[in-house]
Amino acid sequence: MGAIHLIRHGQASFGAADYDQLSSTGIEQGAVVGAELLRRKIRFTEGRTGSMARQRATAEIVLDWLGAGATAKEDPRWNEYDHVDIVARHGGGALQDVNDPRGYQEVLDASLAAWVRAGDDGPCAETWPQFAERVCGALADLVAVLRKGESAVVFTSGGVIGTLAGHLLGDPAMGLLQLNRVTVNCGITKLVTGRGGVTLVSFNEHAHFEGRAARLLTYR
């Protein structure tokens, strides 16, 4: 069987003028997950990254750990949903507040639920069905190029990972609304491919952020 490792990007810059940049913690997280993948001695034959700055920066850090020949092709289909647009359309335009991250999370959760309920009739530039189709298509195309026994690594975001995990479990909306909320920055989700299709075998692995690295465990 082949394997696909989905890596959530490192912590972004919540509340900053440009959210789409790794925080100092996010940079450290990238190094830790890079060391973890190196420890596993997995030979990645395919690499992908979304086009968002936080995804590409995480990819650069991790690939540096994996050494010469490790590359990731940029594919915007692995990008996260547009949380700014979704909150503007479904959450009253609330802004990220470094003094109240929980409050913003509550608004985002409610906005995402409304986004899903709106379906193709929603007001956002990208509707929930379009997002789900986009990320499932990116996965299908990656699976199609993997040969027997080959492995891939993808640098993406929590909403993408949650949606794909939900899709493989039979309910992509559940994945977005529930699994997305608990994805760890630089956590690892593993899929395997074979004659039976694609199977989710582990979700959100983050033992590499236990023990001495526990201070680096973040969800947002």
Image (cartoon, helix red, strand yellow):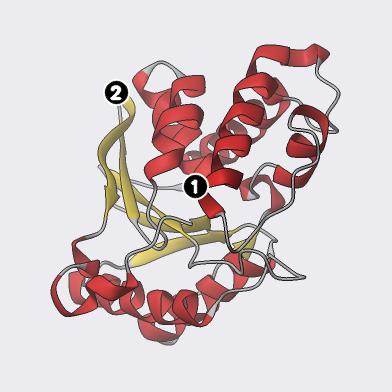
Question: Which residue is rendered at x = 30% and y = 27% of the image?
Answer: 195
**Residue 216, image quadrant:** bottom left
- Front position in the image: 41 or 135: 135
Q: Tag on residue 207?
A: none
Secondary-structure class at tag 2: loop
Mark 1 or mark 2, which has the lower sequence index? 1
Image position, residue 47 (x, y; %): 50, 62
- Front position in the image: 186 or 72: 186
Q: Quadrant of the N terminus?
A: top left
Question: Which residue is rendered at x = 67% and y = 34% of the image?
Answer: 134
Does the rendering let one see residue 157?
Answer: no
The residue type indicated by label 2 comes to: Gly
* Location of residue 97 with respect to 128 vertically, above or below: below
The residue mark sitting in front, 1 or 2, is 1
Drawn side of residue 197 relative to residue 163, left or right? left
- Front position in the image: 185 or 148: 185
Q: Which residue is mark 2?
A: 196
Q: Residue furthest left?
A: 211
Q: Residue furthest front?
A: 99
Label 1 environment density (alpha carbons within 10 Å; few <14, some 14–19, many ≥20): many
Drawn side of residue 126 relative to residue 116, left or right? right
**Residue 96, image quadrant:** bottom right
* Location of residue 93 with respect to 49 vertically, above or below: above
Q: Tag on residue 158?
A: 1
The residue type indicated by label 1 comes to: Gly
Q: How many marks?
A: 2
Secondary-structure class at tag 1: helix
Image position, residue 64 (x, y; %): 45, 85
